[in-house]
Image (spheres, rainbow, N blue to C red):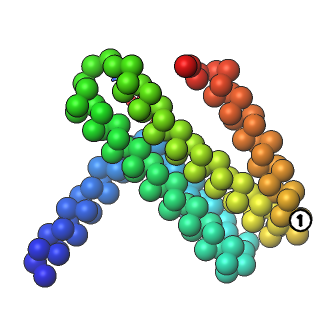
């Protein structure tokens, strides 16, 4: 039992490390806003589970991304093209998870507030994502 409590303490300590990461904090705030909004507008119970799932999926992916970044920094604390590819790929996994979460979240929220067809939210989400991906491609992305 004491060992279990100690493991729990270590894991809680790990969450403190995650909370020091700016991106993790931003995603946590966005998730909290979405979940509060979902509760406020009283989305359907099953839809709320989806919002919860998406929020935690993004946080989990961000946590794994942070692990990979930290590990890479320990093993290769200097410029390395392979580290760049590794980190960019890890970040892209978070981006993909976030993209699908935006689609699901928008679809649920627009459907609940405006009674619109779920496809309207999806379409809206796709437009927003195309704008963001274009910004990423033409703004900062390299290969
Ligand atoms: N050692 C390295 N060698 C080559 N490129 C690197 C290295 N470290 C970082 N980079 C590049 O800089 C980017 C940002 O890396 P950094 O470790 O600062 O992560 P971050 O700013 O916390 O990113 P994220 O937004 O994914 O959390 C990486 O995606 C990668 O393209």
Query: Considering depth in this image, is 9 or 61 the residue closer to the camera?
Result: 61
Q: Quadrant of the C terminus?
A: top right
Examine the image and state in which quarter residue 10 appears: bottom left
Q: Which residue does the image show at 69% across and 60% down from the upper left?
A: 105
The location of residue 71, given as percent across then percent down, is 27, 38
Q: Residues within 10 Å of mark 1 (few under 14, many from 20)?
A: few
> Measured from the top left, where is residue 108 in percent x and y?
75, 65
Say if residue 69 shows up in the picture: yes
- At a point 33% along the width and 45% down the height, the residue shown is 67
Q: Residue 96 vs residue 8: left or right?
A: right
Residue 69: name its quadrant: top left
Question: Is 127 above or below relative to 53?
Answer: above
Residue 134 placement, left or right of 112: left
Quarter of the image with the N terminus is bottom left
Residue 75 located left or right of residue 102: left
Image location (x, y in percent) of residue 106: 74, 57
């Amino acid at each position: 039992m004491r060992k279990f409590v100690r493991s729990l303490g270590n894991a809680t300590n790990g969450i403190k490390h995650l909370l020091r990461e700016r991106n993790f904090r931003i995603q946590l705030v966005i998730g909290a806003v979405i979940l509060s909004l979902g509760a406020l507008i009283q989305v359907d119970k099953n839809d709320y589970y989806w919002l919860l799932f998406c929020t935690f999926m993004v946080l989990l992916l961000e946590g794994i991304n942070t692990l990979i970044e930290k590990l890479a920094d320990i093993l290769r604390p200097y410029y390395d093209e392979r580290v760049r590819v590794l980190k960019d790929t890890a970040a892209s996994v978070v981006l993909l998870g976030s993209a699908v979460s935006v689609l699901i979240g928008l679809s649920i929220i627009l459907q609940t507030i405006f009674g619109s067809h779920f496809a309207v939210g999806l379409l809206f989400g796709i437009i927003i994502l195309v704008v963001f991906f274009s910004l990423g491609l033409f703004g900062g992305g390299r290969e």
